[in-house]
Amino acid sequence: MTDTDSQPQRFVAIRKFTFVVAALAALTVLYYANPAADSHFPACPLHNFTGLHCPGCGTLRAIHCLVHGHLLAAFRLNPLMLLSLPLIAWLKLEQASYSGRIPGNLRISVPGKIIHSLPWIVIAYFVLRNLPLFPFNLLAPS
């Protein structure tokens, strides 16, 4: 292996390390700072201009609740974000299994139907959480 062959691998390792450090830093900030009470966090521009709740509205507050162990409060703020965490973990396992980081011949795959349905789920969630009717109004962050 030449020195030029190892540079892309080194770049990938640095990028992954940087991502992990940034994610841990973000979680640390969200642990100590409450987005509901701190004005340093950005407000949702869509909600500010239209009054509609985008699919991401409430996510910062939900993660703040989640790192404090308040699962029900996190679910109340953004159920789609909380329900998507197992899928994200599944996708990361699939990525690890196909890159050879999981030993053996174990291959984990997410069915294509799930992947192709995600945009429709997000669109439906966006529409439903903005309906002013019970029970859909419960999807809007409080």
Image: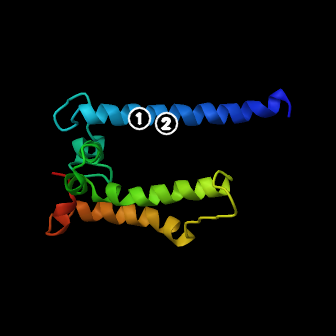
Image location of residue 139, percent across then percent down: 22, 61
Residue extending farthest to the right is 2
Image location of residue 48, percent across then percent down: 23, 41
Residue 37 in which image quadrant: top left
> Residue type at mark 1?
Leu
Residue at 42% over, 66% down: 120
Label number found at residue 56: none
> Residue type at mark 2?
Val
Dot 2 crowding, Cα within 10 Å, few <14, some 14–19, many 20+: few
Does the CB distance between marks 1 and 2 fall below 8 Å?
A: yes
Residue at 46% over, 55% down: 88
Which residue is denoted by mark 1 in the rendering?
24
Whether residue 136 sits left or right of residue 13 in the image: it is left
Which residue is denoted by mark 2 in the rendering?
20
Dot 1 crowding, Cα within 10 Å, few <14, some 14–19, many 20+: few
What secondary structure is found at the residue carrying circle 2?
helix
Residue at 35% over, 37% down: 27
What secondary structure is found at the residue carrying circle 1?
helix
Residue 97 in which image quadrant: bottom right
Residues at marks 1 and 2, CA–CA distance in whole angstroms: 6 Å
Residue 1 in which image quadrant: top right
Relative to 44, residue 74 above or below: below
Image location of residue 73, percent across then percent down: 19, 53
Whether residue 32 sits left or right of residue 5 in the image: it is left
Whether residue 95 sits left or right of residue 123 in the image: it is right
Taking depth in this image into account, of 127 and 33 the one nearest to the observer is: 33
Taking depth in this image into account, of 49 and 56 the one nearest to the observer is: 56
Image location of residue 117, percent across then percent down: 47, 68
